[in-house]
Image (spheres, helix red, strand yellow):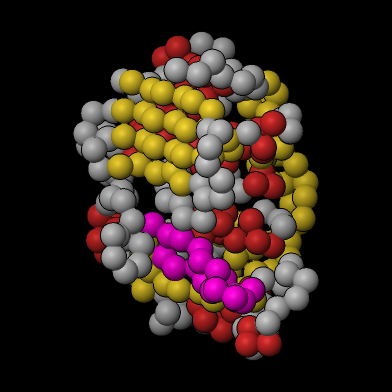
Amino acid sequence: MRRVILTIAVLCALTLTGAAQQAPRFDVASVKPNQGSSGTSTWGLLPSGRFVATNSSLRLLIQNAYELSRNRLLGGPGWIDVERFDILGSAPEGTPEARMLTMLQTLLADRFKLVLRREAREMAAYSLVIAQNDGRIHKALVRSADCEALRNRLKPEAGKTGGPRCSWWVMRQPGTSVSTYQSGGVDLNEFANILASYVGRPVIDRTGLEGMFAFELSWLQESQATAPASATDAPSLFTALQEQLGLKLEPSRGPVEVFVIEAVERPTPN
């Protein structure tokens, strides 16, 4: 799967009384069920000021709109994981990234009648920390100055050649159970949310590192029942983080902010 993940501060649910009416909206928006595609889901912001999602589940759209890992979005009927949608939203060229994501939140409230409730729940989690006791940053974590400059602006599409530019993707090496995460520029809070999808718990960034980083990480997905012999030398995700990036995941427990789906409806296509 190839996705472009966007970084914003999590905002209050736009469906609170009176808020949705004041929230920014796309100039034009289209929501249609996807009944012909299979496999890859894609979504992202285009430099022209458009938001495009193809073959995407509603749960994934909500996660992306509010920058949530799967285990921080709770509730909802089964169809939000199974049914797929194509969404197009248009805004003026150069609209800031955070405002575009707010427009997506408004679209979800308007078209899917989405109502979310925020609350803190005590749960098991991991803390992402620097492995070195002296706090030194591993040489593999390369600061991305060009992506830092784009932090509050619209991010470009992933590069047409080579690695992702100011975005990320995860690729499975053909014929193996080895996955490679490649980032052209991501902040570690965003990276922590991505890790949560693979470790089964919320991950909280406690590295204290600011800015955007470019790096690559390869590991063996231990959830796979079997792995070809050629892949057995690959480390687990926990080991790979420490050996390749100088980071580690420490078990922790505490209050984690979660979003609970209180109401949602299938949209009327347009």
Which of these two is toward me, 249 or 176? 176
Does 109 sit above or below residue 170?
Answer: above
Q: Residue 22 in the image: x percent, y percent? A: 41, 14
Type of secondary structure dominating the magenta stretch: strand
Place residue 154 in its image quadrant.
Answer: top left
Which residue is rendered at x = 37% and y = 28% of the image? 89
Place residue 73 in its image quadrant.
Answer: top right
Which residue is rendered at x = 77% and y = 50% of the image? 123
Is residue 170 rendered magenta in the image? yes
Asked if one can make out residue 189 in the rendered structure from this viewpoint, the answer is: no
Which residue is rendered at x = 40% and y = 44% of the image? 44
Does 142 sit above or below residue 41?
Answer: below
Residue 1 placement, left or right of 49? right
First to last magenta residue range:
166-183
Does 155 sit above or below residue 126?
Answer: above
Which of these two is toward me, 241 or 10? 241
Total numbered circles: 0
Q: Residue 203 in the image: x percent, y percent? A: 63, 57
Which residue is rendered at x = 60% and y = 61% of the image? 195
Q: Residue 167 in the image: x percent, y percent? A: 38, 57
